Amino acid sequence: MAKFYFQLFDRDGVGATETGYDFDSVEAAKAEARRVLAEMAAEGLPAAPLNMLSVELFDESRRPLAEIRLILEEISK
């Protein structure tokens, strides 16, 4: 198992997780990042000015591996 870290970006700003989480693979850690992002969206959709929520995934050396984003876009008709 490898250790992964998450950094969350929501309406309150950026929050880094100091706790490492063990997953069997990068894909399993990405799946958890998607689940966390869904929970964040359930608490409230992103708001202006960025209209974005994200979860960034880091390896045990704190190197960035992936960022999962939810972007809310309004299109005028």
Image (spheres, rainbow, N blue to C red):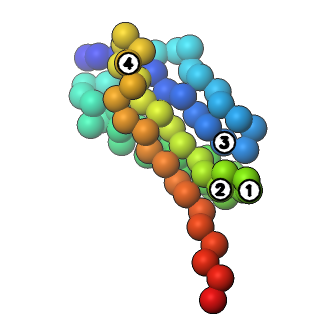
Residue at image x 27%, y 30%? 26
Q: Disc 1, disc 3: CB below 8 Å?
A: no
Q: Position of residue 9 (x, y in %)?
A: 61, 37
Residue at image x 63%, y 89%? 77
Which residue is labeled 3 in the image? 10
Sequence-wise first label, 4 or 1: 1
Q: Disc 3, disc 2: CB below 8 Å?
A: no
Q: In this orientation, which residue lies closer to the viewer: 68 or 29?
A: 68
Which residue is labeled 2 in the image? 51
Kind of residue at badge 2:
Asn
- Which residue ends up furthest to the bottom in the rendered image? 77
Residue 48 disc label: 1
Q: Is residue 44 visible?
A: no
Q: Residues within 10 Å of mark 2 (few under 14, many from 20)?
A: some
Q: Disc 2, disc 1: CB below 8 Å?
A: yes
Sequence-wise first label, 1 or 3: 3
Q: Secondary structure at mark 2?
A: loop
Cα separation between marks 4 and 2:
26 Å
Q: Residues within 10 Å of mark 3 (few under 14, many from 20)?
A: many
Q: Position of residue 8 (x, y in %)?
A: 58, 34
